[in-house]
Amino acid sequence: MPTMVKVVVAEDHALVRQGINMLLSATGGFDLVAETALGSEVEMLVAFHKPDLLLLDLALSDSSGIEVARKVKKVAPKTKVLIVTGNVYPGSVANAFAAGADGFVLKHEQGSELLDAIQAVLSGRQYVSQQVSKGLDSTTNARPGGFGLSQSLTQREQQIVRMIAKGGSNQEIADALHISVLTARKHRQNVMLKLGLHNGAEIAAYAMQSGLAEAPDLDNNL
């Protein structure tokens, strides 16, 4: 009897988890040993089940998938981590691979693309889907071995992104950093221009996906 591939799915949308489950069941050869909507549970589930594969969303409801991937690789370095997420932001792919991810695909891609990605990472190859590659800005070079967020944003801008991700208004950012509201607004505009984003919600999503939301705060006297 052929060995089943043990899989853990970390995805905060129940319908997406169900879709993945149906695809793997129909394909055969996979054993879905656990699923969760919470990033805080992933490390425990992986340590317990020791799966061959973790399918991981970057934007989990309680934590960054980047940090989850990093923790998983520490407790289970042999587990392959395939990112299956909704959007791609500058730096998210490079940061995911830096955290130990083995592949990166989008949720809305065909099931055959996900299966190709699974086969690739289980074979020891890194995988980035064509749609992810097309979605990356050519100037970010955000592929395995490329560079990530720190090269595209200044330290001050990274600090601004973290504060926006926590819900900070221009006034609150200005007060915390001892700068004018006009300067805070200008920093926000520069961040959106550099990253191709349009509002605070997109900045917050970017911070979560890139792992920046989990980074320690910088000195306010920068």
Image (tube, rainbow, N blue to C red):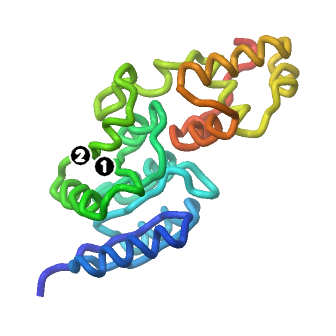
Give residue 157's quadrant in the image: top right
Q: Position of residue 33 (x, y in %)?
A: 38, 78
Q: Which mark is residue 28?
A: none
Classify the position of the N terminus by image quarter.
bottom left
Q: Position of residue 194 (x, y in %)?
A: 54, 20
Give residue 97's quadrant in the image: top left
- Name the foreground residue: 162 vs 21: 21
Give residue 188's quadrant in the image: top right
Q: CA distance from mark 1 to mark 2?
A: 5 Å
- Name the foreground residue: 31 vs 44: 31
Q: Who's the residue at 35% across and 42% down the image? A: 132
Q: Amino acid at mark 1?
A: Gly
| Residue tagged 2 | 126
| Residue tagged 1 | 103
Q: Amino acid at mark 2?
A: Gln
Position above or below: 11 against 163 = below
Q: Who's the residue at 62% across and 38% down the image? A: 202
Q: Are the residues at dot 1 and dot 2 in contact (C-beta closer than 8 Å)?
A: yes
| Total marks placed | 2
- Name the foreground residue: 178 vs 90: 90
